[in-house]
Image (cartoon, rainbow, N blue to C red):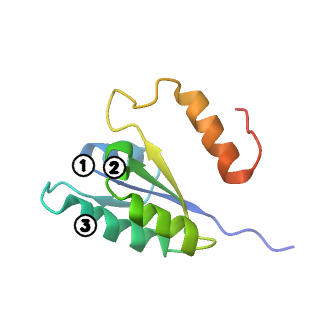
Amino acid sequence: MTKPEKIGIAIIGNRDQTALVRFAGVEKYRIIEDREDINEKVREALMELSGDDSVGIIMIPEEWAGDVTDTLKYIRENRKGSAIVVEIPSGFKAKEQDVKGYYKAYTKKLIGFNVDI
């Protein structure tokens, strides 16, 4: 029996967001600080990380995800087997009030059934 490969997590975010996740052990990240051409930089990072076979989950701040919906749609539709992109709260206030309910519904949409933790 072969041992499954380790699937990693990556984050795209500002210096503070990536630092927090890196403390938890995430090794792949892209820091985007410059406000100029931010959407293009996020698109480039998404395409790069979604093409990396060792990345299974890409985290992106929800405020940036709304600006790159075209790239997210392309990744979901055309890159079969690529990473799942998960939107994370952009700061201390989440866009969704019921975060647990949001991720439960999101998980069901992705894999077809509920996962309770």
* Residue drawn at (60%, 29%) of the image: 101
Sequence order check, earlier mark of 2 and 3: 2
Q: Could you classify mark 2 by the number of other residues whose Cα lies within 10 Å: few (under 14), some (14-19), or many (20 or more)?
A: many
Farthest residue in the right direction? 1
In three-dimensional space, the C-alpha distance between marks 3 and 1, rounded to whole angstroms, equals 18 Å
Sequence order check, earlier mark of 3 and 1: 1
Query: Please, what is the three-letter code of the amino acid marked with disc 1?
Result: Arg
Query: Please, what is the three-letter code of the amino acid marked with disc 3?
Result: Glu
Q: Secondary structure at mark 2?
A: helix
Q: Which residue is mark 3?
A: 40
The quadrant holding residue 95 is top left
Q: Which residue is mark 2?
A: 18
Q: Which residue is mark 1?
A: 15
Quadrant for the N terminus, please: bottom right
Name the front one of labels 2 and 3: 3
Q: Secondary structure at mark 1?
A: helix
User: Do the numbered discs 2 and 1 sit on residues whose CB atoms are within 8 Å?
Assistant: yes
State whether residue 107 is above or below residue 48.
above
State whether residue 114 is above or below residue 31.
above
